[in-house]
Image: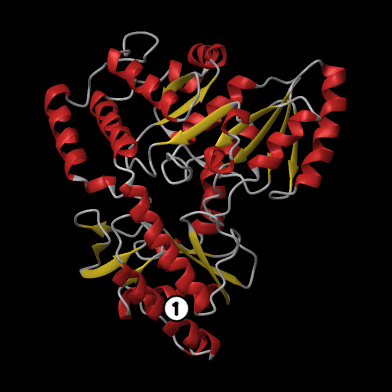
Amino acid sequence: MDLFEKIASNRGPLGSHSHYAHGYFTFPKLEGEIKPRMIFRGKEVLTWSLNNYLGLANHPEVRRVDGESAMEWGMGTPMGARIMSGNSNLHEQLEAELADFVKKPDALLLNFGYQGIVSIIDAVVNRHDVIVYDAESHACIIDGVRLHQGKRFVYPHNDMESLEKQLQRATRMTAETGGGILVITEGVFGMSGNQGNLRDVVALKEKYQFRLLVDDAHGFGTMGATGAGAGEEQGVQDGIDLYFSTFAKSMASIGAFVAGPESVIEYLRYNMRSQIFAKSLPMPLVVGAMKRLELLRTQPELKENLWTVVRALQSGLREKGFNIGTTQSPVTPVFLSGEIPDATQITFDLRENHGIFCSIVVYPVVPKGVIMLRLIPTAVHTLEDVRLTITAFEAVAEKLNKGLYSKTTASVQA
């Protein structure tokens, strides 16, 4: 079959719905200033779908520094990959500050989070090594694992008994190959909101020889006494060998970093293909990241405000009988029973009649018969925002339970 004919006949699990979903349920356009209330298709909506945890996207100091650095440097500076001509003192200063913030000896600045974690995995292991990873790991981890030419074992989410069994298998295998073992998990899982069981994973180091890579994209800046992440929250930051995070969440920007021992970071600096063969992160993004990191360090009230909203939202939903799963972080899933047509109606009702914009997740990301509404609280939401949202959720849940959505059809114009 011709490649393009194959694509036309099978557009994928999401693409198959694009004829009616595009522009509304998928690829929606939120317009206006980044804040809790934005414009969707000409109407103001209360938005719970932006990973702007600490409200830095439109923080006045951040906006000022972003603008000034763009005027000073432009988006082209520095030119070239860092290994060739794109390095600078500011890039190195940001790396040192990031390492200090997450309590690691050294750090390497990365262009993008997704690309970064894939490339880290690719650089760290070879065909003699074994990867053991959590089944609910983010797609970027899964893609990195797929590149691995050696053995890989998966364990059910946070199942320490299964992890130990996989470590036993990996230990026997590496005894024959002469390789090592890399365990990969997340600090905070972005869909469920629960934390990786880092404390128990680290404890297994007493029995097995392995290195631990943690993707803490949602934990960095939101978890722990100083915001250093889920490892700090659980008291095991020292047990994380490679700590990874992106700037796309708490920092509300572009970029990422990996932190760990100096020798390993130096190895990654010279062996990560996604960085060696890619243009350096533009200077305005570097300077902007330094300002954002400064605010994380000096304004703890940002994280305090976030958690005030988180606690109000999550306790309020629980009090009204909503199932929010096992979240231990700001990520707030709300689980309802229904099929994809119900999910479509709920989304339409929330946006058009209640002015609430949140992400909706259906099969195959969650099991059939489950609808997940995913809320991302931020430091710039208010308690009134929380009250209005819970009231709206009560209204749609009542209609869902009465079967009213199955009797109507949403009319969405692309």
Q: Quadrant of the C terminus?
A: bottom left
> Relative to 34, is 312 on the left or the right?
right
- Residue at position x 21%, y 27% from top? 75
Q: Quadrant of residue 72?
A: top left
Residue 271 makes an appearance in the image: yes
- Residue at position x 57%, y 72% from top? 323
- Residue at position x 44%, y 15% from top? 276
Foreground of the two, 263 or 22:
263
Q: Quadrant of the N terminus?
A: top right
Q: Residue at label 1? A: 345
Q: Amino acid at mark 1?
A: Gln
The secondary element bearing badge 1 is classed as helix
Residue 414 makes an appearance in the image: no
Q: Position of residue 139 (x, y in %)?
A: 56, 43
- Check the image and report above or below for 298 versus 5: above
Q: Position of residue 340 (x, y in %)?
A: 54, 72
> Relative to 271, is 41 on the left or the right?
left
> Relative to 69, is 198 on the left or the right?
right
Q: Position of residue 193 (x, y in %)?
A: 54, 55
Q: Position of residue 280 (x, y in %)?
A: 34, 20
Q: Residues within 10 Å of mark 1 (few under 14, many from 20)?
A: many
- Check the image and report above or below for 369 versus 251: below
- Check the image and report above or below for 29 versus 291: below
Q: Farthest top residue?
A: 84
